[in-house]
Amino acid sequence: MAAPGVAEAVAASHPAEGAEMAEAAELSRALSRLLPGLEADSKPGRRRALEALRRALEEPGPAADPTAFQGPWARLLLPRLLRCLSDPAEGCRALAVHLLGLGLRRAARPRDALPRLLPALAARLAGPEPARRPPEACEELRLALVQLLGLAVDLCGAALAPHLDDALRALRCSLLDPFAAVRRESCSCAAALAQATPDHFHMQSESLIGPLMQTISHQHWKVRVATVEATGAVIQFGNGKSVDDVLSHFAQRLFDDVPQVRRAVASVVGGWLLRLRDRYSFFHKLIPLLLSSLNDEVPEVRQLAVSLWEEVGLQWQKENEEDLKDKLDFAPPTPPHYPPHEHRPVLGCRELVFRNLSKILPALCHDITDWVVGTRVKSAQLLPVLLLHAEDHATQHLEIILRTLFQACTDEEAAVVHSCTRSAELVGTFVSPEVFLRLILSTLKKAPSASGLLVLASAMRGCPREALQPHLAAIATELAQAHICQASENDLYLERLLLCVQSLVSVCREDCGVASLQLMDVLLTIVALAGATGLRDKAQETMDLLARAEGVGGCQDLYRKHMGPLLERVTASHLDWTAHSPELLQFSVIITQSEAFLKVLAELIGSLEHTSLWTHLCHLLKGRKTAVCCSASRAGLRCKDGETVRNWVRSSVVLVAGRHLAQDSCPGRLESGIPAASRQPRLPGCVRKLSKTPAGPTARPEQGLTLSQSSEYIVSPCGKGRRGSQATTEQPALMTAGARKKAHITGSPATAQGDTQTLG
């Protein structure tokens, strides 16, 4: 009778505690009636007992008070429910998991259940080896068990520290579960566990990195997102050295087709740059990952990356305010030639890139030439972002940058080439032209290439006019050299060469007058060697742009202005011409496209007739018969029936030449269409008059030839001898020693064909 007295005394002194004890006693009696059913031999009996317990816990009653529920829960209900986790019936195991969740939520001190709950969960989720299937065969039940583990983490928090071994053992297996939903839930549980136990988690966090990296490439994008976020939390609150183990996997996720995954990577990397304890040691590894997201195709991802990167720069700027004091107090304004439509990053962002550029560039330049297309594209897109941050500090790394650009501009992917040309433009913007021209031009001298010309053109396009103008003449002179402008007849090479001229004209504009002749020489070469009609048209358009920059009417005015020097350059080596000589093609362009050629030929007609150039001239002027005929008709000449092309051209040019001579008040007069014998025009240095040789005994008259057949002329671009249509073994008296050694002296087929054609 003493015990009731004690209970009554306690109830009288502490009414609240007495009520709790009464409720606990009532609940214990209610549970005691239901618990024996859990030991029944039949599955339906155990299931009925579990359902009765569920109703008792879910319905309002004595179990509603957490304090009153704590005692019966820990003493009576928890041990029996944990045994039910291994029940042979799947339905009973599912009810047991559900009741355990209800009990944790109702209990006043859920952490008291951890010593028995965690080992039981680990036993059901983790097998003896992670690669084998877990003891729990049902996927839905494994998901429920992981959710129960997550509930324990949320309710108990740091109290799980003594039980980390069991929790991590369960997670290592559930992260590799075949069921995608189990993996997602396991990632969330791992992140929550890392945040709940930071003081102890870092000692064992590395054990989760392996399973997480095996899950990061899962076929379900939601699993990949959850894995990226979980990895961020595990490293944030765990061992920072694990960053090296996940960088390559995160870099691969930047190529993910799902924007949510790329967004998760940007968010996690930005969080590391802001809050990771050892972030200063990993800046050079994390910065490229975040900056790569600035070029993402989805605006939302780009905006997130921009905001995170600016926040990182401002935080670093604040943390290093003493070192940056002078730059903050005396910050120069934005350069006037700063690329338009580009927002200049804050000082902290620029300094971060500049101080880590030497560590970032080698790996980046290697990836730009990777065999995987996606890697090359992503790396090439990152390079201009880095150069935009580095500004003039890129000068000290210019050699490796240009070497990479030379190689990357040969890529078959247009996206790679586009990004590299953008990088070259930024080099021209921020680096002194004296520096980058010395490196680029020296490379072109050694090995001219289309990629080198593209880099040069892009750098000049980005360079300010006032900086490029002093080097204009040197650039044009170098481009006009034969080892560059005649290095290849490939249309791509010529297109890049034309791009260099266009860049010079567009940037320097009126200043191009100092190098007009050299630029005209380059354009003439492009027109002569180009195989595509479109490329020749572009070259002609560039001539017009150059003419407007010089303040003249058009390309014909440029021909008029530079006709003498151009002819002298082109014909200087005419004795060594072959059918494929670039100079022969240039000579053809001058004759067929320039309207000023008649005036020049008027001064040379008396001398050209006895040189190899006369044959080429006759052959080329056939294509301009209409233009010459119009000029000749104005001079009073008409074509006669049976007159050969050679005679017709000669007569036409002579009469038109006489008209030009009369207009220019030049000495000499025309008689019967032939220049006065007393007038001996001065030959330029490029034209050599050859001696005449008597015809041999086997000479045959050429049909339709009205010129004198008693003389032999050099009419072949290879120094080959002809006497009209008559071949001879005799060599011209003034032929060079090298030419005399050539035993294959023959006539020009084109000339022989032209001599026999008549005008209708």
Image (cartoon, helix red, strand yellow):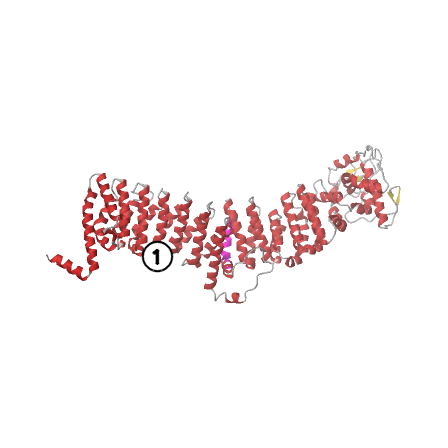
Mark 1: amino acid: Pro
Residue 360, x across and y down, in percent: 49, 54
Looking at the image, can residue 273 be seen? Answer: yes
Which residue is label 1 attached to? 198
From the top left corner, tell me how far across and down residue 268 is, in percent: 43, 53
Between 157 and 605, the residue placed more toward the observer is 157
**Label 1 Cα crowd, 10 Å radius (few <14 / some 14-19 / many 20+):** some
Looking at the rendering, the stretch of residues picked out in magenta corresponds to 353-367
The answer, for residue 202, to whether it is visible in the render is no
Label the magenta part by its dominant secondary structure. helix
Report if residue 366 lies within the magenta region. Answer: yes
- Quarter occupied by the C terminus: top right
Asked if residue 144 lies left or right of residue 13, the reply is right
Specify the quadrant of the image occupied by residue 576. top right
Foreground pick, 256 / 39: 39
Asked if residue 19 lies left or right of residue 186, the reply is left
- SS category of the residue bearing label 1: helix
Work out which quarter of the rendered image holds the N terminus and state it.
bottom left
Comparing 385 with 448, the one in front is 385
In this view, 404 is above or below 755? below
